[in-house]
Image: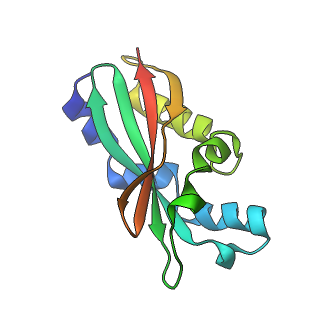
Amino acid sequence: MDTNTIEAILTPATLQNIFPKERTNDFFEALFGDADEGSYTIELGYAGVNQNTLTLELKLHERPGCCLVCNLTQGLPQVFSRHPIINVSGIVADVDALLGDSINCKEWSLGHTEQRQKEMHVIPISITLG
């Protein structure tokens, strides 16, 4: 399966179906008891394929009136990797199903939080394809 085919499958609409916007509120409700306590929203994005690695991104967008700072987001990869509401394993399983039988998602890992803009930080999801 080539890069263009993968890109055509993993559209923004498809990724939003895999990780709906409501999941951010569910996460903060579980974490703080109130969804309004969260300082960012989470969006799943496609970042590309390089050799046998597919990269998705958990994009953290600062909410209005909140502050998204590095010390708030640096520990998130460890939290997200095991949190049942974020469910990275489920995200990878959904992507695997969409890619069909010609290619499989084998292993995944979360990278370090990257600050792309003051209002947006990104946590890469690296998925080994086979």
Give above or below for 71 relative to 85: below
The residue shown at (28%, 37%) is 48
Count numbered badges in the picture: 0
Q: Is residue 69 left or right of residue 2?
A: right
Residue at the image point whose x is 60% and y is 63% from the top = 24
Provide residue 18's location: percent of width, then percent of height. 50, 48
Tell me: residue 71, above or below residue 100: below
Residue 21 point in image, percent of width and height: 52, 64
Looking at this rendering, what residue extends furthest in the bottom direction? 65
Q: How is the image coloured?
A: rainbow
Q: Nearer the viewer, residue 22 or 121?
A: 121
Q: In the image, is residue 19 above or below residue 39?
A: above
Residue 116 lies in quadrant = bottom left
Q: Is residue 83 above or below residue 67?
A: above
Q: Position of residue 96 (x, y in %)?
A: 47, 28
x and y percentages locating residue 106 in the rendered image: 50, 19
Q: Is residue 59 left or right of residue 80?
A: left
| Picture quadrant where residue 30 is located | bottom right
Q: Quadrant of the N terminus?
A: top left
Q: Residue at x 29, y 30 (%)?
A: 49
Residue found at the very far front of the displayed protein? 71
Q: Residue at x 40, y 64 (%)?
A: 120
| Quarter in which the C terminus is drawn | top left
